[in-house]
Amino acid sequence: MSGRTYLIGGHAVRVQLEQPWTFAKLSPEQEALVERLRAGEDIGVESVPADRPEQLEVNDSLMGKDPMTRERWETMSAAERAAFRHALDMQQYAPFETKVDTAPLFTLTVHEGVPAEIEESRSQWTEVTAVDQLPPFYYGYTLGDKTLYEFFPEKDISAGIFVMNADYSEGHYYARERITLRCTSMQVNTSLMIQYTFATAPLDTLLLHASVTRYEGKGNLFFGVSGTGKSTHSRLWHQWVPESDLMNDDNPVIRFPEGGPCTVYGSPWSGKTLCYRNVQAPVNALVRLEQAHENEISRLQPLSAYASVVAAVSTIRWNHRIMDSLVPTVERVAMNVPCFCLRCRPDREAVEVCKNAII
């Protein structure tokens, strides 16, 4: 069994692969790029707003991505195809890899095939959530003290099943055979984010659905309902405030221990934007975005700030124990970090109005 440990938001997490799964090898160019990201360097990856899909290809090129083509696939032997099929793409985690011998907060192990005992226990599963639009991206269940997620379920067949134990210290992702590598890599990534959310909830840690831009050494987090324009606003900052840089574009980590500073970290979870920088900064402000015909900004009172922040936390709302663990951290953020509401257009003036208020 092979394994790697990653330090994400100050928490060590370990990924283990059972044969035939392996970690995909990076090219020399990708290795050099990972070292730059590990050092926190800005490599020029830009936010990907909904109206700029062409930026995806630009960012893929910056990350040294080399997608499989039909022509290349057809020249491969059966053994080469099998090896490729089981080479898990973990490039986005590589900048966070640590060689320090430290006990992980949790371990996630990837297996080939779903054990019969899990399949046979299906009648005992209790459904607790269905995520995303219909048909659901995945279903969540409980089985005794275990938590299960089934990805892309259809007619009792799915892409894979993820199982966590009672304290979330052990996770197991069971990939079904003959599922594409891209699909399995995506579900392992989702499983890691879910397990991270569960395991870190009691540890003064939040995953926030936000885009975070750093300016003068401090992080400013822009958040709001889906489609509000978080990535667009970050992109406008980088266009009109050259001294600013993107730390993460979808799910940065916030840690705010009692009596300590509020710190934001880059993470391996950055949505469509391939911004996997191993960076951290003190939090300067949180800004809730709303679309409007005019640009105006106002400071939120603590109660409104709490309601805004808790709505943006990436968490599992059906699990009351996890939600209760998060409440003190959200309260600490709302009471101590300046929170604003920016009603804005997607233009330069919006950046100027925001910057003048929060800096």
Image (cartoon, rainbow, N blue to C red):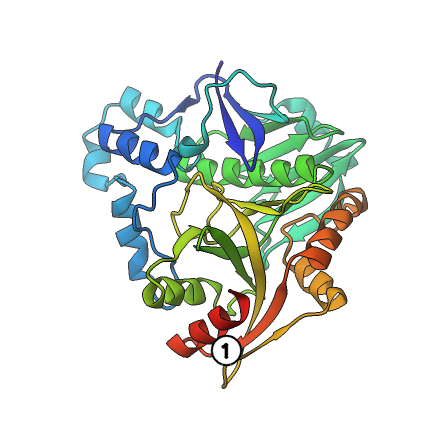
**Outermost bottom residue:** 293
Q: Is residue 92 above or below residue 221?
A: above
Total number of numbered labels? Answer: 1
For disc 1, the neighbor class at 10 Å (few under 14, some 14 to 19, many from 20) is many
Location of residue 142 with respect to 131 vertically, above or below:
above
Foreground: 157 or 87? 87
- Residue 145 drawn at (x, y percent): 79, 31
Tag 1 residue = 344
The answer to whether residue 113 is seen in the rendering is: no
Q: Position of residue 78 (x, y in %)?
A: 28, 23
179 shown above or below 301: above
At horizontal 34% and vertical 56% (from top left) the residue drawn is: 46
Q: Nearer the viewer, residue 23 or 266?
A: 266
Q: Nearest the camera: 186 or 154? A: 186
On the picture, is 349 further left or further right than 284? left
Percent x, y of residue 57: 28, 53
Give the x, y percent position of residue 129: 71, 50
* In-image side of 314 versus 2 (left or right): right
Which residue lies at the image location 40% right of the left edge and 47% below the top edge?
A: 275
Mark 1 belongs to which amino acid? Cys
